[in-house]
Amino acid sequence: MTAIASENSEVTVLLVDDNPQNLKVLYETLKDKGYRLLIANEGAKALDLAHRHRPEVILLDIMMPEMDGYEVCKRLKDDPVTSDCAVVFLSALDDLSSKVKGFSLGGADYISKPFQSQEVIARVDTHAKVIRLERELQARNRELVSDQARILNSISEGIYGLDENGVIEFANQAAALIVNCPVEDLIGKNFFDLHFATASDSDICLPVMGTCRQGVAEHQRNIQLQRVDGGAFPAEYRATPKLDNDELHGAVVVFRDITVELNNERALEEARALVQEQRDQLAHTSRLTTMGEMAAGFAHEVNQPLTAISNYARVSGRVMAKENPDLSLLNETMGKIEAQSHRASEIIRRIRRFMKKPATGKEKLAVPTLLEDTRQFAEVDMRNNEGGIEVVVEDDLPDVVADPVQVQQVALNFIRNALEATRAAGSSAPVEVTARRCGEKCVRVQVRDHGVGVAEEAEDKLFHPFFTTKEDGMGIGLATCRSLIQAQGGEIGYERPDGVGACFYFTLPVAGAGDDACTAE
């Protein structure tokens, strides 16, 4: 008895009959089953009790004065508060037409009089359980709908639910804010008419149209959508088809206004362009500084072939002044003049190429040629070192993609620093320049010297702006080198070698290896 009472404690049953004896029998039948029982002896009272208490089950007599059971049932079903109550008709009318009429009005069951107690108990119990489950399910559905609405309204992106024709069936609060229209006014509008002035039924190229009609997911950015007030805004959207057992029922569209985002992107691009311009200017200034430091050496280098040309010209003049000039000697001398002029021209060509501002940007480069050209360019400093420069390039080294002027500037900076360090240590060991493959996407160029090395506390600061280990240094050389190599998509760094000296390296991306940044291994 306790278990039954506990199970049915929240179930309300309304007993409606104009016959007091019938009400008593029904009451006695159900009173010990744990139900909350309500009693009405006429239709109006039954409607009032049902509206106030929302019983799960109503046992309703059909034959009552003033308002019969059919009318009571009709009014119960018309009232949203009581429409889900299970109406079980009680009547001595056992013909088929009476039963059909009761069911047509929304009745759930039919018990013939005189009724059996066990039958009443069983049917009430069954309908009570069904109604309780239905109400619990409806309550849970309302909670889910409420939770869904809260979640969707908390999202900053606009969300539409469209049918297959593009009619808006759902819109969240963010969508209303973006298009400047209340949610209730958006519902029922056609998405394509609302957001595209030129929309037409035959225009299958409109955004989201393919999702609604063909079930094709879409994602586009910087699409112009119109607002209700006629204004327009750039948007990014994703459209996902609504499918039910592979049957298309429209689309879900998630969109956002990217006006601010596009403005920020433009500002960022302008800032990047300015930074690149300043970086190029700094690199050019650094090259001019390097040329100033090497000016005396280059003057000497150029003066040597010019002096030779002058001497050979005097020799040619003396030969031609003779009565019988030695044409063979004259020809040899003229050849030497031409060779020396080419030598001077090559020195000047390398200087001009190094001094110029890059105009073409990145290009495909052969690393051996680049390093050999840099080695020749460093000959001015090399002549003051006993060991010189050794360049070792791995066989079958692939080409790289980089700015030749800027890469040569970095390599020359490394080599000149290495020569200076070697000279300061009084060493005769050569500066070692090596190039090898580093993974699938990189070529690594390394410059090793046997000089005084780098103090441990200075290693982490070598590439910081304005940090220098030289007494007269400005601290912009290695910082500029890092900026230039990073602009090529490479990496730059320092390694402490075994033994004395220092080892600096940089990497460059292999031609055709993709856009991923190149890192050393």
Image (cartoon, grey):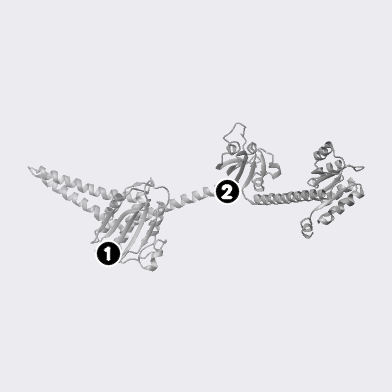
- Between residues 358 and 117, which one lies in front from this camera angle? 117
Specify the amino acid type for callout 1.
Answer: Arg
In the image, residue 309 above or below residue 387: above
Query: Which residue bears the numbered disc 1?
Result: 423
Measured as percent of width and height from the top left, residue 440 is found at 37, 51
Q: CA distance from mark 2 to mark 1?
A: 57 Å
Query: Which residue bears the numbered disc 2?
Result: 260
- Between residues 302 and 67, which one lies in front from this camera angle? 67
- 84 vs 518, left or right, is right
Pointer 1: residues within 10 angstroms few (<14), some, or many (20+)?
Answer: some
SS category of the residue bearing label 2: helix
- Between residues 140 and 13, which one lies in front from this camera angle? 13
Specify the amino acid type for callout 2.
Answer: Val
Pointer 2: residues within 10 angstroms few (<14), some, or many (20+)?
Answer: few
- Between residues 497 and 1, which one lies in front from this camera angle? 1
SS category of the residue bearing label 1: helix
Give the residue drawn at x 12%, y 44%: 330
- 470 vs 244, left or right, is left
